Image (spheres, grey):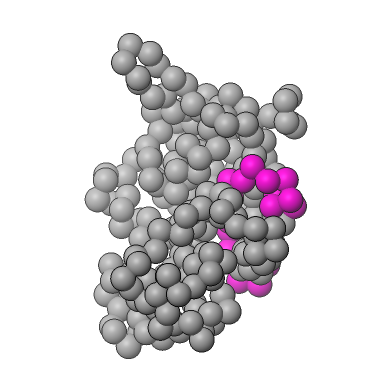
Amino acid sequence: MSETLIQCRALSKTYTRGPEKIEVLQQLDLDIPKGDFVALMGPSGSGKTTLLNLIGGLDNPSSGEIRIGDKRIDQLSSKALAAWRAEHVGFVFQFYNLMPVLTAARNVELPLLLTALSAGDRKRRVEVALKLVGLADRAGHKPNELSGGQEQRVAIARAIVADPTLLVCDEPTGDLDRKTADEILSLLQTLNTELGKTIVMVTHDPKAAEYAKRTLHLDKGQLVDEPGA
């Protein structure tokens, strides 16, 4: 058995909207082994993105525990959590979130500016990351000079440039046509199988979920055996 990388225990998240309390996640238990590629599916409002944000350290649970490797991230201060994210998590979103005034290479370099790496080391890492996603020849191009699929490849290069433990992807192909989406999903699959990256991906697309090693279904803040269960 692979070692467990992500462990959630009795994880709950409640939002307050005026006098109303909305329970998004309810006492959720989850184990994800190192090197896994998990697709999270479920209806709108089921808690998929909330769970992803908690695993990625972008939000804190209302109660329960989240352990990533040997670290209880739910116990970290905001400053310590930000440092942990920078070192251990790569984020891929639906809308790329690239800086329009920067070249592809400069966009990819951004996470490394938070590290103590020299300019030379940063440049080498950027070159490797862009080569991995098949965009070595587009390093000097700005986002408006790239296709949507190329922009997402740049975003993936940015996510992996710091060699994170974990990739979290929120609808990474939601804004792409089927052919381009399949190319991006194949790239994620390669990062998982060949580089051993652990990936947790939220998607509404069953075809996208087929690229993962397994699919987990959320409904009303809880894991269920199958859709509608």
Q: Name the quadrant of the C terminus.
A: top right
Q: Is residue 101 above or below residue 91?
A: below
Q: Is residue 100 above or below residue 127?
A: above
Q: Is residue 157 magenta?
A: no
Q: Name the quadrant of the N terminus.
A: bottom right
Give the percent coordinates (x, y) of residue 225: 74, 31
Residue 126, quarter of the rendered image: bottom left
Q: Residue at x 51, y 84 (%)?
A: 136
Give the percent coordinates (x, y) of residue 207: 74, 51
Q: How many tags in the picture?
A: 0
Pick the residue in front: 113 or 92. 92
Q: Residue at x 29, y 84 (%)?
A: 119
Is residue 180 at all visible to an observer of this figure?
Answer: yes
Q: Residue at x 56, y 75 (%)?
A: 133
Q: Is residue 213 above or below residue 63?
A: below
Residue 109, quarter of the rendered image: bottom left
Instruction: Please provide the residue range marked out in magenta.
Output: 192-210
Give the percent coordinates (x, y) of residue 39: 65, 47
Q: Residue at x 47, y 37 (%)?
A: 50
Give the percent coordinates (x, y) of residue 131: 54, 82
Q: Is residue 207 magenta?
A: yes
The answer to whether residue 129 is left or right of residue 208 is left
The answer to whether residue 70 is left or right of residue 150 is left
Pick the residue in front: 87 or 22. 22
Among all residues in the image, which is located at the extreme left? 79
Q: Is residue 120 above or below residue 176?
A: below
Residue 149, quarter of the rendered image: bottom right
Is residue 189 at all visible to an observer of this figure?
Answer: no
